[in-house]
Amino acid sequence: MNTRKANIKQPGILADRQTANSRSVVRALLQAFVITMVTGLPAYSAPDLVSDDDLFSGFSETCSQKIIYRPTARVSQAEHDENGNEVIVLDPSLKSPAEKSRRIFLAAHECAHHLFGHTSAEGLIERRYVVGMIAKQELMADCWAAEYLGRLGQGGDMAAIAESFYRRGRLYAVNGYPSGIERALTVRRCWRKGLKTRRNESPTADENASFSDRSD
Ligand SMILES: [Zn+2]
C-alpha cells in the first residue's frame, strides 16, 4: 500500500521538481535581463547631453567645463581631469528627459564650485580642514545655481528641486553637508532673487508660475 502510494506520488514529485527547476531558470534569466537593463544599456547607450540646449543657455560661455557622464557617489561632482582641466561629472541617469531639471541644476551647481575656486588646491584644503566649509561651499553653489537659472528664466522645475532637498529634512546634514532643509530654503531664496533680477532687467519676462515671489 505504502509502496504503491509512493510510486503513484513519485511522478508528481518529479514533475514538481522539474517545474521548480524551470521556474528558477526563468527567474534567473529575468534577473539577468533586469540587471542588464538597469545597470547597463539604457543609461550608457544614450548620447551625452552636453550642448547648451541640454543644460542651459550660456553654459558653454559662463561655465565652459567639459561634461562627463560617469557614475558618481553623489550623482554629480566638480573635479579636474588628468590634464588638470575643470570637468563636471554627471551620473548617466541624468541623461533621462525626466531628469532635465535636475541635470540643469546640478550642472549649474558644479559649475559654481569651479567658478568660486572650490576645486582649486586652496579650496579643497579649506573644504577638508576648515570647520563648516563644506556646508558653506555647498550652499554657495546651490545659491549661485538657483539665482543664475532664475535670472535666465531657465532651470525647469526649481520648485521640485527645492522640494526634493526639503524632503531630506535635517537627517542629511552628515559629513559636513548642509541639511536638506537648509538647501531647500537657500534654493528658494536665491531662485526668487534671480527671478526678481530678471523682472527688473526685462519687465515683460515670463515668470515661472510654479514658484512665485512670495517671502517665507
Ligand atoms: Zn556641491
Image (cartoon, rainbow, N blue to C red):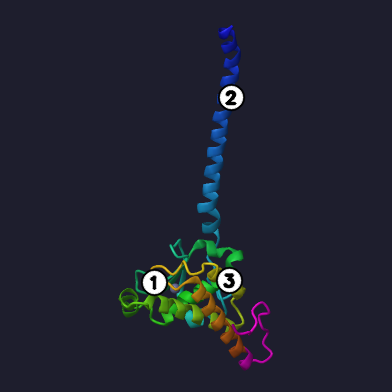
- Secondary structure of residue under mark 1: loop
Task: Say which amino acid is labelled 1.
Answer: Gly
Magenta stretch bounds: 199-216
The image quarter containing residue 163 is bottom right
Q: Secondary structure at mark 2?
A: helix
Q: Residues within 10 Å of mark 2 (few under 14, many from 20)?
A: few
Please, what is the three-letter code of the amino acid marked with disc 2? Answer: Asp
Where does the N terminus fall, quadrant-wise? top right
The residue that disc 2 covers is 16
Q: Residue at x 37, y 78 (%)?
A: 133
Which is in the foreground here, disc 1 or disc 2?
Answer: 1
**Numbered disc 3: secondary structure:** helix
Mark 2 and mark 3: span between their CA atoms? 51 Å
Q: Between disc 1 and disc 2, whose residue precedes?
A: 2
Q: Which of pointers 2 and 3 indicates the residue nearer the eye?
A: 3
Residue identified by numbered label 3:
163
- Asked whether residue 110 is in view, the answer is yes
Looking at the image, residue 105 sits to the left or right of residue 153; the answer is left
